[in-house]
């Protein structure tokens, strides 16, 4: 048995509730209480003592929505996230090209024109000037759009006659020629031309990601990776190889993209099967795109693009069919839906075909919700996967997309919680930074990175509500609130230990805390 003591230990069962010590055994919490009482009760059984030395312990933080391998790739690739102009991106590409042999792909991640003073989209001709020998693919921060040069388009067989795929857009010049800018499903036209990744590559990306998440205090994450790296088996094997439960412990809950569900069937696997640390999750579906590229599906047209409502990835009939495929397998669904049009379609599909086994569906992002739509969500046992850092990164440019009238029904986390709608907190990494403290700060402070202004102050969460998103909320998302997300007897011994008390900090100070220790299954997996 192990005794953890010497600091404040927040149970998160109720706001402000804390204890002095915790006893764990074989990965579970055996007892919580005062240090002298627990030491006396378990004195003859305690084999290890861990003095927190004044640090503060919380239930282990879990990211409810991210892309683990994608985060690892960001650590491996050309990172364009913090660049401030198209020119800066081009300069970085010029330097990178010099280090890569001709013919090899140049891959960059994270560019965001909304953070640039000149909000223009880089044209393929500009990329061609940098290199006509290297195929290039530069993924936008939202991962719902990419840029490609002529070489990449040639390898992909994309010509002027290539038509937009269902749920995707090939952006064209005034003369109808492809500009090198691809939205949503059209990205697959380019990606299919890329060389197949190796198992070693996937293992390296997974290993880098898990180590980085441990360092940020994350004990687990709900990820969606299984459809993008050469098939289900190859990707699933990478997770099981890296997160073996011995050398590496991390609770990976893997959503199953509908594109690989038949592969999962052939392996005779299903929902919540796997290991203690690598578990299969809900059926993942995309119902729309993103606000940045105006492909999120809205009920009313974009304020800055009259006549445009976004993109429905599937027809309502197709969406209903995918929900039915999940139900045949007794699976919940996890549906990407940003716009109110998308969320409404998803809510209708779930209501028409509800789960019968007590599990719980989830809607990912749900950024634009009218009061009537929130009422519909109240009737469903769903969890909304929200990304608080979207407030920091999307404002003020998102006001141009939505207009002030619609803004009052957007990014409304407090309204949702007050309405009794369950919410879980995630980063959507690599789209946003992996650090959960940035999400907690954004939920409490609602301050934009671009202009440092506070937006929708009435939607600020308390620190308790914000921390709950990454503890109790993430547990609710996978219907495990009876074993994860709190520090109490019978729960998993997963802890995040910080060097300061979040509940004693000012909102802008919340992300200044440092992780001193991350504990998974009762074992220290990271120590500062």
Image: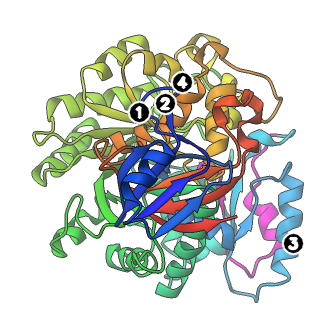
Give residue 415's position: percent from left, percent from top.
48, 16
Of the pair 102 and 452, the residue shown nearer to us: 452
- Residue 317 seen in the figure: yes
- Which mark is drawn over residue 13? 1
Does 130 appear in magenta? yes
Does 139 appear in magenta? yes
- Whichever of labels 1 and 3 marks the residue nearer the N terminus, that label is 1
- Residue 160 seen in the figure: no
Residue at x 55% of width, y 38% of height: 387
Give residue 222's position: percent from left, percent from top.
42, 54
* Residue position for label 2: 17
Give residue 485's position: percent from left, percent from top.
41, 44
> Do tag 4 and tag 1 residues touch (Cβ < 8 Å)?
no
Looking at the image, residue 10 lies above or below residue 55: above
* Secondary structure of the residue carrying numbered label 2: loop
Q: CA distance from mark 4 to mark 3?
A: 38 Å
Quadrant occupied by the N terminus? bottom left
């Amino acid at each position: 048995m192990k005794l953890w003591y010497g600091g404040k230990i927040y149970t998160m069962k109720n706001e402000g509730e804390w204890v002095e010590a915790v006893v764990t055994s074989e990965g579970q919490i055996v007892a919580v209480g005062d240090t002298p009482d627990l030491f006396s009760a378990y004195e003859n059984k305690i084999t290890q003592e861990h003095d927190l030395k004044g640090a503060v312990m919380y239930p282990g933080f879990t990211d409810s929505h991210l892309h683990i391998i994608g985060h690892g790739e960001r650590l491996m690739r050309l990172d364009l996230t913090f660049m401030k102009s198209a020119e800066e991106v081009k300069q970085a590409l010029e330097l990178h090209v010099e280090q890569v042999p001709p013919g090899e792909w140049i891959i960059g991640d994270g560019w965001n024109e909304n953070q640039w003073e000149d909000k223009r989209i880089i044209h393929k001709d500009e990329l061609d000037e940098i290199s006509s020998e290297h195929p290039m693919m530069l993924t936008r921060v939202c991962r719902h759009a990419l840029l490609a040069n002529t070489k990449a388009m040639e390898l992909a067989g994309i010509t002027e006659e290539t038509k937009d795929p269902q749920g995707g857009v090939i952006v064209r010049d005034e003369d109808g020629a492809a500009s090198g800018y691809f939205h949503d499903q059209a990205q697959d036209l380019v990606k299919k031309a890329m060389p197949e990744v190796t198992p070693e590559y996937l293992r390296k990306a997974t290993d880098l990601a898990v180590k980085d998440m441990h360092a940020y205090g994350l004990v687990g994450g709900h990820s969606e990776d299984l459809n993008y790296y050469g098939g289900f088996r190859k990707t699933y094997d990478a997770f099981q190889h890296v997160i073996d439960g011995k050398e590496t412990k991390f609770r990976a809950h893997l959503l199953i993209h509908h594109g690989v569900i038949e592969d999962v069937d052939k392996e005779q696997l299903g929902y919540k099967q796997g290991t203690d640390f690598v578990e299969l999750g809900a059926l993942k579906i995309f119902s729309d795109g993103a606000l940045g590229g105006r492909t999120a599906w809205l009920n009313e047209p974009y304020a800055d693009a009259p006549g445009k409502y976004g993109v429905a990835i599937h027809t309502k009939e197709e969406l209903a069919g995918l929900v039915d495929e999940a139900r045949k397998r007794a699976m919940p669904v996890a549906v990407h839906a940003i716009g109110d049009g998308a969320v409404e379609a998803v809510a209708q599909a779930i209501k028409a075909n509800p789960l019968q086994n007590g599990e719980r569906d989830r809607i990912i992002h749900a950024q634009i919700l009218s009061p009537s739509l929130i009422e519909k969500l109240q009737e469903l046992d769903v969890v909304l996967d929200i990304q608080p850092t979207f407030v920091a990164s999307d404002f003020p440019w998102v006001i141009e997309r939505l207009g002030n009238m619609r803004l009052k029904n957007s990014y409304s986390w407090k309204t949702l919680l007050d309405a009794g709608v369950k919410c879980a907190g995630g980063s959507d990494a690599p789209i946003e930074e992996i650090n959960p403290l940035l999400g907690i700060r954004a939920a409490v402070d609602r301050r934009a990175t671009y202009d440092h202004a506070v937006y929708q102050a009435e939607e600020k969460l308390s620190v308790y509500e914000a921390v709950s998103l990454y503890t109790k909320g993430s547990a609710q998302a996978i219907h495990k609130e009876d074993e994860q997300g709190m520090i109490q007897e019978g729960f998993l011994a997963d802890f995040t230990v910080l060097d300061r008390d979040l509940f004693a900090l000012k909102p802008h100070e919340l992300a200044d805390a440092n992780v001193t220790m991350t504990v998974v299954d009762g074992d220290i997996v990271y120590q500062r």
